[in-house]
Image (cartoon, rainbow, N blue to C red):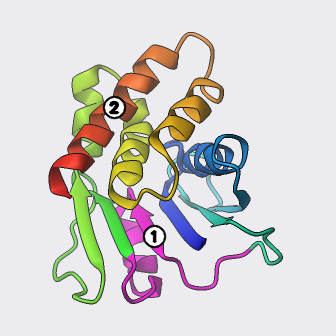
Amino acid sequence: MHKEIRFTGFGGQGIIKAGFITGKAACIYDDKHSTLTQSYGPESRGGACSAQLVISSQPVTYPDIIEPDIFISMSQEAYTKYKDNLKSGGVMLIDEDLVKTGKVRTDVKFAKIPATSLAENIGQKVVANIVMLGFMTAVTKVVSKKAMTNAIKTSVPKGTETINLKAFEKGYEYGTKIL
């Protein structure tokens, strides 16, 4: 198994944190290997950012992604920039509250979730990235639900575990309905 994932959005959305949590779920709790690289725009909040994650059943010898199998976009700018780089047959996941796709590629599996709205309904817009992780876990099964739950519990700030796990469950539940 070898999967390349690109998480994209803008600074302040927790894009890098989402990549970190997914990599931790794979390595620590699913007994796989992973590497994470990241990039930021010139601004720390509001600028473009992305996290590139490689998950493999074998040690990862090259840390950068070449052609992602999974593309997650939580901003219009990132969608526009990276949508054509997704591997044919790959999975494209978007936050439909923030990304307008127009015509979607027919050679990829496409799914959308109102991640930001669901997070706001929970009471914290800041957990939209965790809603997206739940959705990604349900749709792609790149890591197990149990591994992701454990990684979230041990990666979010103390005192926020409950709301983050609620956000994850909301996204996961949404993802199971589109399968």
Q: Residue lying farthest top?
A: 159
Q: Position of residue 82 (x, y in %)?
A: 45, 78
Inspect the image, locate mark 2, and give the three-letter code of the amino acid beneath it: Glu
For label 2, the residue is 169
The one nearer the camera, 140 or 82, is: 140
Q: Is residue 5 magenta?
A: no
Q: If the image is split into quadrants, where does the C terminus sit?
A: bottom left
Mark number for residue 177? none
Between the C-alphas of marks 1 and 2, the distance is 20 Å
Q: Viewed as shown, does residue 100 lie left or right of 1? A: left
In the depicted structure, whether residue 86 falls above or below residue 75: below
Name which residue lies at 32% across and 41% down: 172
The one nearer the camera, 160 or 26, is: 26
Name which residue lies at 63% across and 47% down: 30
Name which residue lies at 38% across and 47% down: 132
Please tell me in which quadrant of the rendered image residue 29 appears. Answer: top right
For label 1, the residue is 70
Give the residues in magenta.
64-90
How many callouts does the rendering have? 2
Q: Is residue 83 magenta?
A: yes
